Image: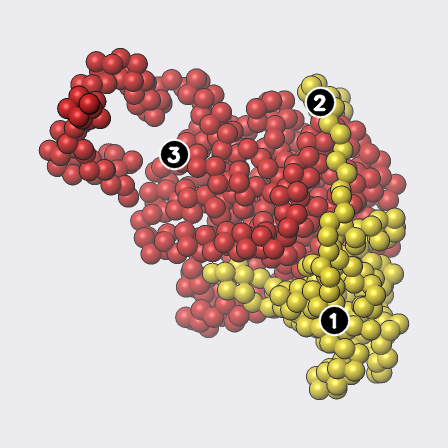
């Protein structure tokens, strides 16, 4: 007998009760979604800027190696998207468009459509994600309602920069992935 | 070695064990604060527990749905009855790709299977990429906590091992400096690895996708640069629907570290063009635990570690005192299910205060199961020392005369006995404990004198 059948049979031998699958009710969401979202992102050690502030931030930083898949922001002198993500090892800044965001925790949803190469938001030194104010939802339940039917090979909720506290619980930003997250409200 | 003797080891360094205790309590406190900021917190716990009840009672159909959907998405699905088969499957995939070096992100399941030594014996270099896991791997230690693998170490220890392994400055203990040294070291490994292994937080039956949560982004760095992704998953990690993730992701990080969500929550549904995803579904005693009516609820666990952070015993005795892959209260009810002899002291490593059950995001009745395991173990080993003292007590309590005499004796001896008799090395219980001041007379004696 295959291991698969062995496992399934072992489960079927156990008497099971007819439990019903609970339905998830609607929960109240914060009134001011944008303000809550900003607080959440800041709590996760990211920053939120306006479209105008973004332009001056970008000039000030002076990054040379920039990749953008954004259809919402105009940025010049970009790198060309490679086919092999290893070529992005020196990437300084990636700019991506977020689909939906959850105000309660700052999580922003992106999938293959926006990423084009899945490694981009992780391998880049710094990350910018755009989100329209109208796409900020209350909580994770509302976010899953929006993305529930979408079929993408890969999707990710990103809520902040890469971080760790594995050395004596001291928070350090920039463990393996992006050292900063800047969210641009468009 | 038993839990008490290993705990005594840990307590030798008093400053360190005190720090351990306070730091974990701080994490527990953060969990309390953030849970109170969500008005529906208790509803979410009830929902999560109900969802897991449904899972445990429909595990066969959910697993088969998961398999069918994952296959439809182009994922290779493997089944393993035990650790040995799990390791063989992983190794055969590596052999097929002629792979001699892999990166791995935090996976308690591969610890449970002892995958690292299995692969290393066969000439594969395994690099754990979670910072805490890399640190303990350098020291050839297992993780001491399922979420905070290096919580038993101080930055001085880490500075020393990094100086040796990564040539960092001698004596530089700055966490930022040390973390960035690890970043550079691991980036090199990420860029070279052809195969990446991850654990799984949730597998979704409805879609055949699985979700991996990290703060460091190490799982994603590994899998998106590699050609092959092997995900290792316990069969109990299944959930029915995609929308159920909303409930579990709201609970997981808040319970684990007191943050609103992990910074990266990746949903893998099908491989990137030209790449492969394999998933290994592991039993390894889980179906046996499912068949034990009193203990099956332990399979609801989502591995947040909240029960460890709150446990007065875990905080003071450290993760290694348990000697099991999953330590702490949840480990003490899971491990006897795997090997009741080896882990017979674990269910006794508890005050039964119930704090673990109070913080559990999926409402496992941990302290009640600890009590139940004690019954099972005492039944199976009537000679256990603690069992004996309980028997003595039951003899005293059932005979009124014996109770009266022993009470008088105790009140006198508590006053007269030198402390050295109570606080001697043979009496483990006496450590860190003080005996009460004995009253002059018993309540019965007092009542006789004072009754109206």
Task: Check the residue under mark 2 and report the chain it is in.
Answer: A
Q: Are marks 2 and 3 on the same chain?
A: no
Quadrant location, the C terminus of chain A: bottom right
| Residue B95, horizontal then vertical, whole percent | 72, 45
Residue for point 67% across, 50% down:
B250
Q: Which mark is residue A34?
A: none
Chain yellow in the figure, letter: A
The red chain is B
Q: Is residue B300 above or below residue B401?
A: below
In x, y percent, where is residue B306? 54, 46
Disc 2 designates what residue? A17
Q: Nearer the viewer, mark 2 or mark 3?
A: 2
Closer to us: B122 or A71:
A71
Where on the picture, by quarter, is residue B380?
top left
Residue A136 point in image, percent of width and height? 79, 63
The numbered dot on residue B2 is: 3
Residue in view at x 66 percent, y 42 percent: B43
Specify few, some or many for label 1: CA neighbours under 10 Å numbering under 14, 14-19, or 20 or more.
Answer: many
- Rendering coords of residue A123 (x, y %): 72, 66
Chain designation of label 3? B
């Amino acid at each position: 007998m295959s291991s698969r059948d062995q496992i399934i049979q072992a489960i079927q031998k156990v008497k099971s009760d007819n439990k019903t699958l609970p339905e998830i009710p609607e929960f109240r969401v914060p009134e001011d979604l944008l303000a809550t979202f900003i607080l959440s992102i800041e709590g996760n050690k990211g920053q939120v800027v306006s479209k105008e502030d973004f332009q001056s931030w970008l000039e000030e930083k002076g990054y040379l190696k920039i990749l953008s898949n954004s259809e919402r922001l105009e940025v010049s002198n970009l790198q060309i998207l490679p086919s092999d993500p290893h070529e992005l090892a020196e990437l300084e800044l990636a700019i991506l468009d977020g689909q939906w965001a959850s105000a309660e925790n700052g999580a922003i949803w992106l999938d293959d459509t926006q990423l084009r190469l899945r490694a981009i938001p992780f391998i880049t030194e710094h990350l910018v994600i755009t989100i329209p104010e109208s796409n900020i939802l209350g909580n994770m339940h509302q976010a899953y309602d929006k993305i529930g039917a979408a079929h993408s090979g890969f999707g990710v909720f990103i809520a902040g920069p890469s971080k760790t506290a594995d050395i004596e619980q001291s928070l350090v930003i920039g463990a393996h992935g992006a050292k900063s997250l800047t969210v641009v409200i468009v | 070695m038993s839990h008490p003797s290993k705990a005594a080891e840990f307590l030798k360094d008093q400053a360190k064990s005190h720090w351990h205790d306070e730091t974990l309590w701080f994490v527990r406190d953060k969990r309390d604060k953030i849970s109170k900021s969500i008005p529906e917190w208790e509803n979410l716990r009830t929902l999560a527990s109900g969802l897991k009840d449904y899972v445990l009672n429909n595990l066969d159909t959910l697993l088969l749905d998961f398999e069918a959907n994952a296959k439809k998405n182009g994922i290779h699905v493997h089944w393993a009855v035990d650790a040995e088969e799990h390791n063989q499957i992983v190794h055969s995939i590596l052999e097929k790709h002629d792979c001699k070096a892999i990166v791995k992100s935090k996976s308690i399941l591969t610890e449970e299977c002892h995958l690292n030594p299995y692969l290393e014996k066969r000439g594969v270099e395994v690099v754990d990429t979670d910072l805490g896991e890399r640190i303990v791997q350098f020291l050839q230690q297992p993780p001491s906590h399922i979420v905070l693998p290096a919580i038993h170490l101080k930055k001085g220890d880490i500075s020393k091992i990094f100086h040796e392994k990564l040539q960092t400055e001698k004596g530089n203990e700055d966490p930022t400096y040390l973390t960035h040294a690890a970043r550079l070291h691991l980036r090199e490994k990420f860029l070279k690895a052809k195969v990446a292994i991850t654990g799984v937080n949730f597998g979704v039956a409805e879609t055949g996708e699985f979700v991996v949560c990290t703060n460091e982004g190490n799982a994603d760095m590994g899998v998106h640069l590699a050609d092959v992704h092997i995900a290792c998953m316990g069969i109990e990690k299944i959930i029915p629907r995609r929308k159920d993730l909303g409930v579990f992701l709201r609970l997981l990080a808040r319970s684990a570290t007191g943050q609103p969500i992990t910074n990266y929550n990746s949903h893998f549904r099908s491989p990137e063009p030209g790449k492969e995803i394999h998933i290994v579904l592991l039993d390894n005693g889980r179906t046996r635990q499912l068949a034990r009516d009193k203990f099956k609820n332990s399979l609801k666990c989502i591995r947040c570690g909240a029960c460890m952070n709150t446990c007065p015993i875990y905080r003071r005795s450290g993760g290694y005192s348990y000697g099991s892959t999953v330590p702490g209260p949840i480990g003490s009810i899971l491990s006897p299910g795997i090997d009741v002899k080896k882990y017979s002291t674990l269910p006794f490593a508890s005050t039964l205060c119930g704090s673990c059950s109070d913080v559990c995001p999926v409402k496992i009745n941990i302290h009640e199961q600890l009590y139940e395991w004690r019954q099972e173990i005492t039944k199976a080993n009537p000679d256990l020392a603690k069992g004996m003292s309980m028997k003595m007590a039951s003899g005293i309590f059932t005979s009124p005369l014996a109770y009266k005499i022993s009470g008088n004796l105790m009140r006198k001896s508590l006053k007269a006995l030198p402390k050295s008799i109570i606080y001697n090395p043979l009496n483990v219980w006496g450590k860190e404990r003080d005996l009460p001041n004995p009253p002059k007379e018993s309540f019965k004696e007092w009542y006789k004198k004072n009754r109206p």
